[in-house]
Image (tube, coloured by chain):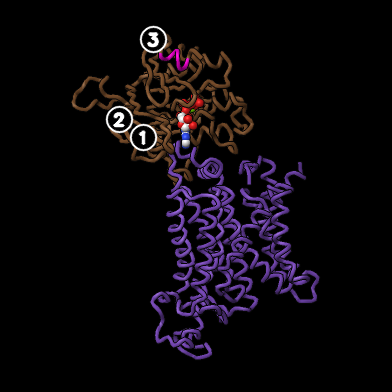
Chain colours: A purple, B brown
Amino acid sequence: MSATLATPSPGGSGRLTLRLLMLGAVLLLAVLPALNRLPADSALHVSDFIVSVSGKWITYAILALAIDLAWGYAGILSLGHGAFFALGGYAIGMHLMRLIGPRGVYGHPTLPDFMVFLGYKELPWYWLGFDHFPFAILMAMAVPGLLAAVVGYLAFRSRITGVYFSIITQAMTYALMLAFFRNDMGFGGNNGFTDFKELLGMPLNTPTARSALFYASLALLVLSYAICSRITQSKLGRVLVAIRDAESRVRFLGYDVTQHKLFVFVLSAVLAGLAGALYVPQVGIINPGEFSPGNSIEAVIWVAVGGRGTLVGALLGAFSVNALKTWLTTVAPDLWLFALGGLFVAVTLFLPRGLIGLVSKVTK
Amino acid sequence: MSDGISPPLGTPKEAAPVLYLDGVSVVFDGFRALNNLSLIVGAGELRAIIGPNGAGKTTMMDVITGKTRPTEGVVRFRDHDLTRLDEATIANLGIGRKFQKPTMFDALTVFENLELALKAPRGPLACLRWALSGEARRRIEAVLEEVGLTARAQDRAAILSHGQRQWLEIGMLLMQDPELLLVDEPVAGMTDQETEHTAALLVRIAGKRSVVVVEHDLEFVRALGSKVTVLCEGSMLSEGSIDHVQNDPRVIEVYLGR
Ligand SMILES: Nc1ncnc2c1ncn2[C@@H]1O[C@H](COP(=O)(O)OP(=O)(O)OP(=O)(O)O)[C@@H](O)[C@H]1O
Ligand SMILES: [Mg+2]
């Protein structure tokens, strides 16, 4: 894609309108769980389905923000962000599995069912500590962050950019998928983790747990947006845009480009990991399919559709593409992949700045 | 900053060059873009470099700024061996460069381009915490004034004319406050008046800083009033005052006489 991207900061009145619109959207989302508690015959009642599906989309929106920070601003096109999301999901999944305790089918006091089934005698060392919630959350950030740090350092130091970097990240998520499919990895093989019982003392699948997870996701979305916009509006954000558009020139000004790229890439992976950690308890399952290369590509398409390099576009894209997906997969499930591909081609050809670009064109 | 570094071993001042190239060769697929080139630039010196297209002038700057590794030879800036350092480290040592084809950040405004170039801590966290101080703002405004872009400060660099891009890149070079300025064809696309202004500006900077200017415009080179080095086929062909090199028969044959 060419350099038709706008300066990341829209002008004064435009920004105010944008802020108000976003505030409205957040408030609208925030009342959903409350409306869900209304009697079912009330005109304002919102179904369980709407609440849980919006909670899921919010975690997708966080993933989209993370991708936009790296791709839209720093020009780092990761096609492996689904892996960071899935790793965060597995970290919380391990916690949820430990919390099942003796309530599993085999009734073993510490070992999850799949381990008993596979003949494990004791917990592998890397499962230790996951009985503590803070440790699991820490790992949901640290593991994706470290992986991004290693992959990013090796690639950025060797000045691997553009499509070559994208291919490396695709290979990364693919390799992880194959690894997590293996039973002897100790992560439940192709079944992954499911049948979760509770989190932080709340039985899952209850309205209380649903709204708690929903609000936690919404809070993380607001926090992530605040962090990302703090970065993009700082001089660091302008350095990232400069790296995106003319990486080599930035070096001649004395900036160590590797450090800057590593900083955003790791931060972006950590946000994706946290999003995954909120996603899994809401959908009740995590398996190696989450690492499939297609997932990462789909998430990039959300950002492209919404309009990259704007943050708001990423949110818009994540919500609108997933709304389309949810609708289409109920009316015509076979069409979804064609629709997604067609959408991407159409946006690339006709809306290079995405839905946000369309909105700003229409309002002008 | 470190203008006052005393020359090693008590040698006289002119014996402590800022930039020292010796026997530098750059070979691209068997083609010698630089061929056993030697060049010494002293502290505060202004030096003009001329020579036909393809003589290796830009390649020489690439070697100094870490863009291209020499196949052989010595490249030193003060006490530093530049052949082992990367571009960012070299820039932070105090070597600034203006590219032959003006290159800046089109998505950013003129002001933001200068702000990025302004000498300040370069790390990600320092950039995140950066707040434009009154002092920094004044320095940027002074440079905007100097390069005549005050009225364009809030325009995106993408919409500048070629001449204005030249000026913006010169402005970015000034913001870095380097000890050695490498200026590749600064006046291409400028009016006569702007050319004179640029010459005066470079003369003013030299003295405090060392400046190496590559230019084809001989009127401009004359206005610099500096020592001139003529490059040809990757080697030094002649060196001396502008009058000296203009009357050198070898220079006339390969460059001026065409
Ligand atoms: N990266 C490269 N790979 C191959 N050849 C190169 C490379 N860079 C420069 N050259 C060749 O080296 C020679 C010197 O190029 P250079 O750009 O240094 O010349 P110059 O003196 O700056 O010329 P001009 O006045 O046209 O700017 C040219 O023949 C050029 O084609
Ligand atoms: Mg040149």
In this image, B180 relative to B170: left or right?
left
The relative height of residue A317 versus residue A34 in the rendered view (above or below) is above
Check disc 3: other Cα within 10 Å, few if <14, some if 14-19, many if 20+.
Answer: few
State whether the magenta stretch is mostly helix, strand or loop.
helix
Give the extent of the magenta segment.
B250-255
The relative height of residue A347 versus residue A135 in the rendered view (above or below) is above
Q: In the image as oriented, which residue stretches furthest toward the front?
A: B30
Residue B9 at x, y = what percent?
Answer: 18, 26
Quarter that holds the N terminus of chain B: top left
Q: Are marks 2 and 3 on the same chain?
A: yes
Residue A206 at x, y = what percent?
Answer: 63, 78
Reading the image, the residue beneath label 2 is: B78
Check disc 2: other Cα within 10 Å, few if <14, some if 14-19, many if 20+.
Answer: some
Q: In the image as oriented, which residue stretches furthest toward the bottom?
A: A106
Dot 1: element: helix
Q: Is residue B134 visible?
A: no
Q: Chain of mark 1?
A: B
In this image, B167 relative to A36: left or right?
left
The disc at residue B244 is: 3
The relative height of residue A76 versus residue A269 in the rendered view (above or below) is above
The disc at residue B247 is: none
- Residue A74 falls inside the magenta stretch: no
Dot 3: element: helix
Labels 2 and 1: the sequence-earlier one:
2
In this image, B38 relative to B98: left or right?
left
Q: Nearer the viewer, residue B252 or A52?
A: B252
The disc at residue B93 is: 1
Labels 3 and 1: the sequence-earlier one:
1
Report the number of numbered marks.
3
Dot 2: element: loop
Q: CA distance from mark 2 to mark 3?
A: 29 Å
Q: Nearer the viewer, residue B114 or A222?
A: B114
